[in-house]
Image: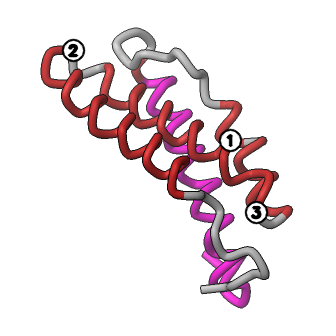
Amino acid sequence: MPTTASASVLDEDEALELLAYLITAARTQVDEAAEYGPLRLLTAARRLAERIAPRSSDATAAFVAGPLQRMPELAVPRDEREEYVACLDELCGALAAHLTARWAPDRAGSS
């Protein structure tokens, strides 16, 4: 795993804020329609991305500013489900490519 001069991308307060969001989202999900689960997870991913982008590598900052931001923020997979799933698949593929380039650059591009 690569290390940088600034290994910490979240301080304790930022981590606690994200933790609080995840825990309370889990609780509200019990009473919400199942379609809201992905929405809550993507909201948490965006919050994390906002915090880490200024303190991360250029490649990570580009990922969170690009593929993650292209995912519709308020999309609920109930309508146009196939398109929504395709967008999530595209986001997962972009993340996989970013992680491969970061942690296994000799394997990047070979599928």
Circle 2: element type: loop
Total numbered labels: 3
Q: How is the image coloured?
A: secondary structure
> Would residue 30 be visible to someone looking at this image?
yes
Front one among 75 and 109: 75
Q: Main secondary structure of the magenta part?
A: helix
Image position, residue 64 (x, y; %): 70, 47
Image position, residue 95 (x, y; %): 60, 57
Pointer 3 local density, CA inside 10 Å: few below 14, some 14–19, many at least 20: some
| Precedes in sequence: disc 3 or disc 1 | 1
Residues drawn in magenta: 82-111
- Left/right placement of residue 95 relative to residue 86 reads right
Which of pointers 2 and 3 indicates the residue nearer the eye?
Answer: 3
Query: In terms of image quadrants, where is residue 37?
Result: top left
> Would residue 109 be visible to someone looking at this image?
no
Task: Estimate the spatial distance between the alpha carbons at disc 2 and disc 3, rounded to whole Å.
Answer: 35 Å
Q: Residue at x 63, y 69 (%)?
A: 8
The residue identified by callout 3 is 56
Q: Amino acid at mark 2?
A: Ala
Q: Residue at x 68, y 65 (%)?
A: 98
Task: Estimate the spatial distance between the alpha carbons at disc 3 and disc 1, rounded to whole Å.
Answer: 11 Å
Q: Is residue 97 one of those drawn in magenta?
A: yes
**Quarter holding the C terminus?**
bottom right
Q: Amino acid at mark 3?
A: Ser
The residue identified by callout 1 is 50
Pointer 2 local density, CA inside 10 Å: few below 14, some 14–19, many at least 20: few
The residue identified by callout 2 is 33
Circle 3: element type: loop
Pointer 1 local density, CA inside 10 Å: few below 14, some 14–19, many at least 20: some
Q: Amino acid at mark 1?
A: Glu
Image position, residue 96 (x, y; %): 58, 63
